């Protein structure tokens, strides 16, 4: 007997929630209790009165698991809206990274050249190191980090994915 595993899919979920103490713990607990993984998580206030926040979660799983996650998030009381950007249609996703590279001589020159190709901006420079700021898709950042690994990468900090539906529609 062979067990069939459904193909895992990556999904970007956007939630609008009440900005109250414990909401992030409730959402993370929902994932933890069911053994689901969060690949990326970002949170930000979106109203001037600080009452509402937007949470972007990147997760993966078979379609039935993603549907279950969506339904369970929708049931949480402080959650006003859950949108699966992946299924909503065309959307834009970006991530910010700070990448520290230490090196001398030719490695410094090559790090600057690659940074220029990737449109990474040096935001801190010493005679021994650079800290580059880079925005883009997670794949673009992964590629930049991989290349910098060979040139003296010592540290990376990433914000996580944020996303928004393209066009005139409001997410």
Image (tube, rainbow, N blue to C red):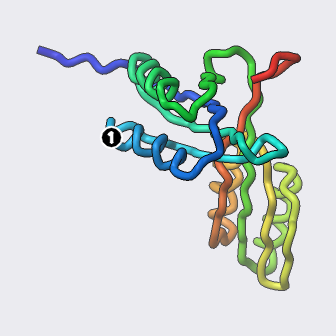
Q: Residue furthest left?
A: 1
| Quadrant where the image shows the N terminus | top left
- Mark 1 neighbour class, 10 Å CA radius: few under 14, some 14 to 19, many 20 or more: few
**Quick check: 171 left or right of 38?**
right
Name the residue rendered at 65%, 68% in the picture: 153
Name the residue rendered at 79%, 48% in the picture: 135
Q: Quadrant of residue 6?
A: top left
Q: How many marks?
A: 1
State the image coordinates of residue 29 (x, y, percent, origin top left): 40, 44
| Quadrant where the image shows the C terminus | top right
Q: Is residue 54 above or below residue 165?
A: below
Q: Secondary structure at mark 1?
A: helix
State the image coordinates of residue 155 (x, y, percent, origin top left): 63, 69
Name the residue rendered at 56%, 36% in the picture: 58
- Please name the residue that numbered disc 1 is placed on: 33
Question: In front: 131, or 106?
Answer: 131
Q: Is residue 150 above or below residue 68?
A: below
Question: In front: 59, or 4?
Answer: 59
State the image coordinates of residue 124 (x, y, percent, origin top left): 85, 74
Question: In front: 73, or 96?
Answer: 73
State the image coordinates of residue 121 (x, y, percent, origin top left): 87, 60
Question: In front: 61, or 130?
Answer: 61
């Amino acid at each position: 007997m062979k067990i069939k595993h459904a193909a895992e899919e990556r999904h970007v979920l956007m939630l609008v929630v009440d900005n109250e103490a414990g909401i992030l713990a409730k959402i993370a607990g929902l994932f933890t209790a069911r053994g689901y993984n969060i690949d990326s998580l970002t949170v930000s206030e979106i109203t001037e009165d600080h009452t509402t926040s937007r949470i972007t979660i990147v997760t993966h799983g078979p379609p039935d698991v993603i549907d279950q996650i969506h339904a369970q998030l929708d049931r949480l009381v402080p959650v006003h809206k859950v949108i699966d950007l992946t299924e909503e249609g065309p959307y834009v996703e970006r991530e910010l990274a700070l990448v520290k590279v230490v090196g001398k001589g030719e490695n410094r020159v090559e790090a600057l050249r690659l940074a220029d190709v990737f449109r990474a901006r040096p935001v801190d420079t010493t005679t021994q190191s650079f800290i580059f700021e880079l925005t883009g898709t997670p794949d673009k950042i992964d590629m930049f980090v991989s290349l910098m690994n060979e040139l003296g990468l010592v540290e990376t900090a990433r914000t996580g994915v944020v996303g928004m539906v393209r066009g005139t529609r409001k997410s």
